[in-house]
Image (cartoon, grey):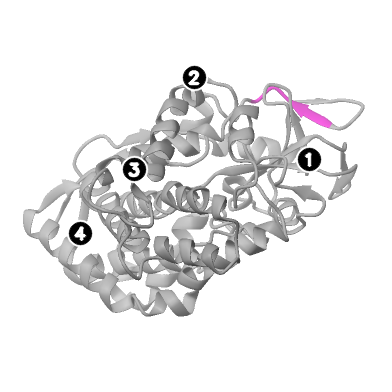
Amino acid sequence: MAITATGPSSEVDLFSDDSVRDPYGRYRELRDAGPAVYLEKNQAWAVTRFQGVREVLRDWERFTSEKGVAMNEAMNAANAGSIVASDPPHHTQLRKVLSERLSPGAIAKLTGQISTQADALVATLVERGDFDAVQDLAAFFPISVVADLIGLPDEGREKLLDWGNAVFDGFGPDNPRTAEAMPKIGEMWAYVGEVATRDRLAPGSMGLAVYEAADRGEIDPESCIPLMGGYVAAGMDTTINAIGTGVQLLAEHPDQWQVLKADPSLIRSLGNEILRYDSPVQMFARTATDDQEIEGQTVPAGDRVLAVYGSANRDERKWDDADVFDVARNPIDHLGLGFGVHRCAGAALARLEIEAIFASLVERVTAIEIEGEPVRQLNNTVRGLKSLPVSVS
């Protein structure tokens, strides 16, 4: 750590394998160094405290998404004008199309259906006794829910998770993970362009509603495919990683599992605590529109700003015992689903899926044990597991 003429700087690379595998010690180091720390290797200002990250996410006029939210120019160019890389009023128009189908009110109508699906899956796995909590549970459930919601045909669904991981890798800097992801991202866009067409989407689906919005003149016709592609890519990873991580945390903290068993009304609190404690989405970039101050630290105009959700959610300035997993905490203002105009459009659906899975587990399972070494998925942007062998009784 060093102090320069412009402020604190660090040689930490938040996208190295070691950082991605276990970032929390580095996050604490950056939080202690200042409200914004310049990362020499990543050429961006890391904002890691809760107050600062919330400020960056809230104020889109000072910290714009229009210059891209990725750490490399190729991805930013590819996403120009998309929902993730735009600000109001364009962002508002695109978001409105999704919000009609993803609002809390609209998602509430799916509660019975999703609860039934979740319980059927959990019942099958519990009967087996041992399974992979990521591949058999966390990944299987959200993929089917999101694909059905968009109205995608069965063809190609088996590749959705790999493509989604690739997109989030693509938001990183020019490192090997980003390079490996780019061809897969191209495959995904080719799939969406070929399969997510008006004639192949299910009647009454969210995908078809996107085309209907274009017919009404609410969005440009050329926005249809990017809008659906964005949701195909981003609509699953938060839920998948939260469910997988949640199972791991409850197995590693049997006392918390017993608290949950004793009071199943804590299911919603559990979901919030998983999203806070080990945020599925760790960070996204913004750009300072002019010289901006973040808690007294000046960030020069045009500099890239990295809003680190994963660090903000462990900020001891905000949370008591921030490094403790507590299912009764109910941190309703966590940043695991973002904040401001770019808060996750599918937040209500993600919450419903997470709560449905854990409600069924609490009802059917006495104990969860990890039966093999968990395998972490190394990704530039999202944090989760690739495999988690467990047994249940």
Which of the numbered marks, if any, corresponds to residue 34? 1
* In the rendered image, the vertical position of residue 378 relative to residue 297, given as above or below: above
In terms of secondary structure, where does tag 2 sit? Answer: helix
- Main SS of the magenta part reads strand
> Is-magenta flag for residue 9?
yes
Badge 1 crowding class, 10 Å Cα cut-off, few under 14, some 14 to 19, many 20 or more, is many
Task: Residue type at mark 4: give it.
Answer: Ala
In this orientation, does residue 327 appear? no
Which of the numbered marks, if any, corresponds to residue 176? 2
Task: Residue type at mark 2: give it.
Answer: Pro
Mark in the foreground, 1 or 3: 3
In terms of secondary structure, where does tag 3 sit? Answer: helix
Q: Residue at x 64, y 63 (%)?
A: 93
Mark 4 or mark 3: whose residue is earlier in sequence: 3
- Cα–Cα gap, marks 4 and 3: 28 Å
Task: Residue type at mark 3: give it.
Answer: Leu
Mark in the foreground, 2 or 4: 2
Which of the numbered marks, if any, corresponds to residue 161? 3
Q: Residue at x 49, y 64 (%)?
A: 347
Residue 127, by quadrant, is bottom left
- Cα–Cα gap, marks 1 and 3: 37 Å
Mark 2 or mark 4: whose residue is earlier in sequence: 2
Mark in the foreground, 2 or 1: 2
Q: Residue at x 56, y 35 (%)?
A: 171
In the foreground, 15 or 225: 225
- State the residue position of label 4: 367
Give the residues in magenta: 8-12
